[in-house]
């Protein structure tokens, strides 16, 4: 019975959705187009000062693109679908740290310091089961100085309520659960506050 409850609720646990009133919206650049479009909608509905895209090098096809990082690609996508450039910043990282999410948080902190943009809170915009892990790492990097919320967009490539009924849902959930455990057991304890 306990195993059944765990299996049925693990998706909801990993797909943490805890938005807060925030100064900036931080969008993970690797998100699919429908999620990028939803991020623009969230930005326009909220009272954000800035939308920031984050992300590292594009590992495949970069020779064909004019964009070399997911941060740049997401920013270009947002501009193309109508977000005004003055509200947008792309913050790429070089991918040399403990994790890609930690690299993104580090690059964002450096950018905030460089631009002298004073914020008290941010919402991290990400996809489904990836959200809890990203939220933990951003909280580790920014709190208590900056409050961190998270918005988990619902994935369209499988049914989150019946994730075990598709190979895509099963692979995604298993991969994110392992990554969550790894983050909790190893990475969070390694990173400086």
Image: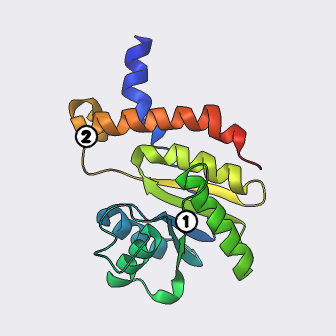
- Establish if 176 lies above or below 6: below
**Front residue of 97 and 175:** 97
Mark 1 lies on a secondary structure that is loop
Tell me what residue is drawn at x 29 percent, y 67 percent: 61
- Establish if 86 lies above or below 153: below
- Quarter of the figure that contains the N terminus: top left
Tell me what residue is drawn at x 40 percent, y 72 percent: 74
- Establish if 175 lies above or below 97: above
Does residue 48 appear in this view?
yes
Tell me what residue is drawn at x 55 percent, y 65 percent: 94
Mark 2 lies on a secondary structure that is helix
**Where is residue 139 shown, x and y percent of the image?**
67, 51
Q: Quadrant of residue 41?
A: bottom left
Within 10 Å of the Cα at label 1, are there few (<14), some (14-19), or many (20+) other Cα atoms? Answer: few
**Which label number is shown at residue 158?**
none
- Establish if 64 lies above or below 7: below
State the residue position of label 1.
94
Sequence-wise, which precedes: disc 2 or disc 1?
A: 1
State the residue position of label 2.
168
**Where is residue 145 shown, x and y percent of the image?**
78, 60
């Amino acid at each position: 019975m306990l195993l059944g409850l765990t299996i049925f609720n693990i998706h909801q646990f990993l797909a943490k959705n805890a938005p807060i009133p925030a100064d900036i919206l931080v969008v993970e650049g690797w998100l699919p187009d429908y999620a990028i479009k939803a991020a623009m909608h969230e930005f326009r509905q909220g009272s954000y000062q800035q939308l920031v895209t984050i992300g590292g090098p594009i590992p495949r096809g970069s020779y064909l693109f004019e964009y070399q990082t997911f941060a740049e690609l997401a920013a270009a996508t947002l501009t193309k679908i109508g977000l005004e450039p003055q509200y947008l910043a792309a913050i790429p990282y070089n991918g040399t740290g403990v994790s890609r999410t930690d690299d993104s948080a580090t690059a964002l902190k450096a950018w905030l310091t460089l631009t002298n943009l004073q914020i008290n809170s941010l919402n991290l915009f990400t996809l489904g089961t990836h959200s809890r892990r990203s939220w933990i790492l951003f909280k580790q990097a920014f709190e208590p100085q900056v409050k961190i919320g998270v918005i988990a967009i619902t994935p369209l490539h499988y049914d989150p309520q019946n994730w075990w009924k598709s190979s895509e849902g099963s692979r995604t959930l298993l991969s994110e659960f392992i990554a969550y455990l790894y983050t909790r057991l190893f990475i969070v304890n390694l990173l400086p506050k």
